[in-house]
């Protein structure tokens, strides 16, 4: 790999290979929007720790997104990455630490909890390559404190979208606050837009039968589709 490029470590989908993860999309969008030269190194879940551990000797957990900067420095975590890239490449600005981001997270987090049964089922079944399945099952079961299949069986269903709807509609209201444009800051793109785009793109990647109920639960599907359309120039690069 060329030393002059940023390397983005990302999770591949099944063929045709493309980016799907909310968290890695945040970093991919930063790189695309800033117009930075980068390449993608695809890593499956079981490969993340052995690939990254030598570069983070003091860490116990290893996640993507991670980037390797042109100077050879490795940076983990989408917020840390965004801050460093903003520092090195301030234009166009991304307002990484805008208070809007925390407001958004406060709305998204409870929605995510309600939607978790769908996510935990659809990601391995529809997106992940088979090599990831044992890892996914083991780590998610451990986190849940119960068998993953049992959790999905007992909790998944159309009712989860109804439960998530009030929180998703808070995001919709937030998106409408600035009427100067389709973004959270009106006509100005910021990092919170990339977080929301990553969320929407992940659900779209899981399938239209999952994406459409999500859109309906927002209370204004067209608003969120227009939002994605406005970000299309930076969403197009998803496979390299």
Image (cartoon, rainbow, N blue to C red):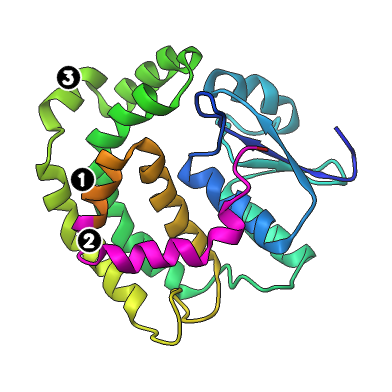
Residue at the spot x=62%, y=26% of the render? 43
| Along the line of sight, the residue nearer the viewer: 226 or 105 | 226
Classify mark 1: residues with Cα within 10 Å, few (<14), some (14-19) or many (20+): many
Question: Is 195 drawn above or below residue 38 in the view shown?
Answer: below
- What SS does tag 1 mark? helix
Residue at the spot x=42%, y=44% of the render? 202
- Of marks 3 and 1, which one's residue comes earlier in the chain? 1
- Of marks 3 and 2, which one's residue comes earlier in the chain? 3
Disc 2 designates what residue? 167
- What SS does tag 2 mark? helix
| Along the line of sight, the residue nearer the viewer: 65 or 58 | 65
Q: Which residues are magenta?
A: 216-239
Relative image position of residue 145 (x, y in whole percent): 25, 24
Q: Is residue 46 magenta?
A: no
Is any atom of residue 235 visible in this view?
A: yes
Task: Tell me whether circle 2 and circle 1 mark residues in contact (CB < 8 Å).
Answer: yes
Disc 1 designates what residue? 114
Q: Main secondary structure of the magenta part?
A: helix
| Along the line of sight, the residue nearer the viewer: 227 or 91 | 227
137 left or right of 230 in image: left
106 left or right of 193 in image: left
Q: Please give the count of numbered marks on the rendered protein.
A: 3
Classify mark 2: residues with Cα within 10 Å, few (<14), some (14-19) or many (20+): many
- Mark pair 3, 2: CA separation: 26 Å
Relative image position of residue 165 (x, y in whole percent): 17, 57
Quarter in which the C terminus is drawn: top right
- Of marks 2 and 1, which one's residue comes earlier in the chain? 1
């Amino acid at each position: 790999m060329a030393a002059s490029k940023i390397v983005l470590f990302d999770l591949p989908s099944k063929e045709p290979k493309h980016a799907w993860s909310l968290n890695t999309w945040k970093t991919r969008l930063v790189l695309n929007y800033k117009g930075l030269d980068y390449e993608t190194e695809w890593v499956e879940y079981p490969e993340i720790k052995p690939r990254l551990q030598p570069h983070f000797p003091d860490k116990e957990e290893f996640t993507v997104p991670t980037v390797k900067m042109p100077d050879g420095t490795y940076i983990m975590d989408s917020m840390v990455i965004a801050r460093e890239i903003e520092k090195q490449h301030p234009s166009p600005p991304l307002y990484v630490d805008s208070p809007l981001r925390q407001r958004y997270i406060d709305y998204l987090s409870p929605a995510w909890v309600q939607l978790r049964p769908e996510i935990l089922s659809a990601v391995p079944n529809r997106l992940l390559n088979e090599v990831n399945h044992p890892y996914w099952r083991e780590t998610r079961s451990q986190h849940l404190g119960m068998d993953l299949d049992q959790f999905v069986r007992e909790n998944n269903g159309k009712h989860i979208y109804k439960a998530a709807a009030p929180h998703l509609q808070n995001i919709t209201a937030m998106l409408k606050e600035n009427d100067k444009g389709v973004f959270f800051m009106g006509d100005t793109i910021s990092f919170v837009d990339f977080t929301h785009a990553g969320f929407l793109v992940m659900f779209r990647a899981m399938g239209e039968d999952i994406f459409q109920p999500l859109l309906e639960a927002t209370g204004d599907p067209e608003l969120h589709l227009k939002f994605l359309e406005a970000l299309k120039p930076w969403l197009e690069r998803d496979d390299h």
